[in-house]
Image: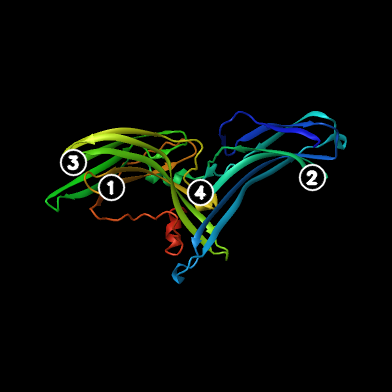
């Protein structure tokens, strides 16, 4: 039977910690009997880790997967407690601890490829034997990222996409235009993104709905087993909204929508700032064109900043024209992009 009856970490009731802030808590140790020469400590640990598999030699005609990995330590702090007289009597003992988070660490993040996690861990040892241990996960909102470099890209912002449609073996023609407008495009975690969507339906069919989603696009930087750098771009959906429009033939409609951002979430950043992961965001509006297999997609760049910023710049307008049969120019998911032009891809995430 262990000498330690129970070990507990008592933390403040804070849902999300901010980089650069502090955490104060207690380690509570309940002993069954006297413990001689104990080592009691609390650690604050923050690590980033990623791993994915890719085909090593696709041109040789056989399958052989190679793991690409990388890891980094963002914070590692330990507070050892002084034990008076070198022993602890039976009963309950309380130890106060205090840690300060570094100001430039990234947010808590988890995906199928990588994660960034923070924990507080309390340990009681004797003669280098761990008698009891408890750890608690922390949610942390990072503040890394220099928003000043995005000032030229701030809103009001309007992005418009037009898609041409051909019906009934070229006997009828038409097009659909989607335009998304924002008063600003820099937001903070927990903010609400309010935007307007103008739909111009110049076909003889109804445009039934538009699906809006905020995509988080992550560039991962790993290394192969031979130490070669590898890059992988992947995206995930942060939040989404389905809006019924029912825009009739040759009609126009304006829809006002809102998406609420979660807390915490990674801020827009570069590989230089986060070392193994870089983050950017897009607000994507998607609508299936009536009686076709085509889809019209509008992508609006969104910047996630750590603290509110106020910018005043002129409106930027981007108009893209897509015809039936055009292919996407985006990077496909889970595809190694280092062999094409890793510098060009990575430049979108680096200064």
Q: Pointer 4: what residue?
A: 112
Q: How is the image coloured?
A: rainbow
Label pair 4/2, CB-CB below 8 angstroms: no
Q: Residue at x 20, y 39 (%)?
A: 206
Q: Quadrant of residue 148?
A: top left
Q: Pointer 2: what residue?
A: 129
Mark 2 vs 3, N-terminal side? 2
- Mark 2–mark 3 Cα distance, whole angstroms, equals 73 Å
In the rendered image, is residue 324 in sight?
yes
Q: From the viewer's perspective, is 181 left or right of 240?
A: left
- Mark 4–mark 3 Cα distance, whole angstroms, equals 40 Å
Looking at this view, is 102 or 191 the one in front? 191
Q: Residue furthest right?
A: 85
Mark 4 vs 3, N-terminal side? 4
- Mark 4–mark 2 Cα distance, whole angstroms, equals 35 Å
Q: Is residue 70 above or below residue 40?
A: below
Crowd class of label 4 (few under 14; some 14 to 19; many from 20; radius 10 Å)? few
Q: Quadrant of residue 123?
A: top right
Q: Pointer 3: what residue?
A: 205
């Amino acid at each position: 039977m262990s000498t330690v009856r129970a070990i507990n970490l008592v933390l403040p009731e804070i849902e999300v910690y901010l980089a650069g802030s502090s955490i104060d808590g207690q380690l509570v140790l309940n002993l069954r009997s006297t413990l001689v020469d104990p080592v009691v400590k609390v650690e604050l640990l923050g690590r980033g880790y990623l791993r994915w598999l890719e085909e090593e030699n696709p041109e040789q005609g056989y399958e052989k997967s190679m793991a690409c990995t990388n890891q980094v330590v963002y914070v590692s702090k330990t507070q050892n407690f002084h034990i008076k007289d070198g022993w602890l009597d039976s009963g309950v003992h309380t130890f106060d601890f205090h840690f300060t988070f570094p100001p430039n660490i990234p947010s808590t993040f988890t995906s199928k490829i990588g994660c960034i996690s923070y924990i507080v861990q309390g340990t009681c040892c004797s003669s280098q034997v761990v008698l009891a241990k408890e750890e608690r996960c922390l949610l942390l909102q990072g503040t890394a990222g220099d928003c000043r470099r995005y000032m030229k890209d701030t809103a009001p912002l309007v992005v418009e996409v037009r898609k041409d449609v051909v019906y009934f073996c070229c006997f009828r023609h038409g097009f659909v235009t989607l335009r998304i407008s924002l008063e600003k495009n820099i937001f903070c975690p927990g903010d609400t993104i309010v935007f307007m969507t103008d739909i111009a339906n110049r076909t003889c069919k109804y445009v039934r709905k538009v699906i809006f989603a905020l995509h988080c696009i992550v560039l991962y930087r790993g290394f192969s087993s031979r130490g070669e750098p590898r890059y992988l771009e992947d995206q995930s959906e942060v939040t989404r909204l389905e809006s019924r429009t029912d825009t009739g033939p040759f009609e126009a409609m304006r829809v006002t929508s809102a998406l609420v951002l979660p807390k915490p979430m990674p801020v827009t950043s570069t590989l230089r700032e986060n070392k193994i992961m870089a983050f950017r965001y897009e607000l994507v509006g998607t609508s299936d064109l009536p009686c076709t297999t085509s889809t019209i997609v509008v992508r609006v760049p969104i910047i996630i900043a750590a603290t509110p910023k106020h910018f005043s710049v002129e409106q930027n307008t981007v108009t893209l024209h897509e015809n039936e049969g055009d292919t996407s120019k985006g990077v496909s998911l889970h595809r190694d992009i280092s062999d094409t032009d890793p510098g060009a891809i990575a430049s979108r995430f680096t200064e």
